[in-house]
Image (spheres, rainbow, N blue to C red):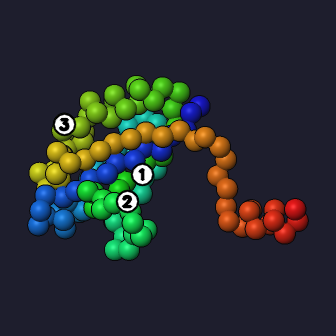
Amino acid sequence: MGTYKLLVLTNAVKGRDDEFNKWYDNQHIPDALTVPGYMAAQRFALADVQMPGAPVSPWRYLAIYEIETNDLKATMTESMSRAGTERMPQSDAADHTSSAVFAFTPMGPRITAEEVQSRRRTG
């Protein structure tokens, strides 16, 4: 079975962040997690401090979904077929014109700083 991370970059309609975040946390993520293959989700807000010289992000919010499926296209098609229906209502507090969605698949194992330090000590 394939594992994926689906990154969703979003913004709220200007002045409606509280409403947007309430909808996203209490309505949208629970609805998304009923789609077969969607295993977990976590949201993030853009930090005040970024890497020096990095471009300014056009997005304020990030959601990362963990997906396990043998057919990513079918899983994402099912998710999109629910969007805007009673199974996955949308919010007019979300700026849908500025959102971006990207699916990623792992290229290698997850490596921790502790593992690297341990290898360097014993290497």
Cα–Cα gap, marks 2 and 1: 6 Å
SS of the residue at dot 2? Answer: strand
Check the image and report above or below for 54 versus 10.
Answer: below
Cα–Cα gap, marks 1 and 3: 22 Å
* Residue at 84 percent of width and 69 percent of height: 121
Residue neighbourhood size for the residue with mark 3, other residues' Cα within 10 Å, grouped as few (<14), some (14–19), many (≥20): few
Q: Which residue in the protein does label 2 denote?
A: 43
* Residue at 18 percent of width and 38 percent of height: 84
- Residue 50, x across and y down, in percent: 39, 69
Depth order, front residue of 123/55: 55
Callout 3, which amino acid?
Thr
Sequence-first disc among 2 and 3: 2
Q: Which residue in the protein does label 1 denote?
A: 64
Callout 2, which amino acid?
Arg
Circles 2 and 1: CB atoms closer than 8 Å: yes
Question: Viewed as shown, does residue 123 lie left or right of 26?
Answer: right
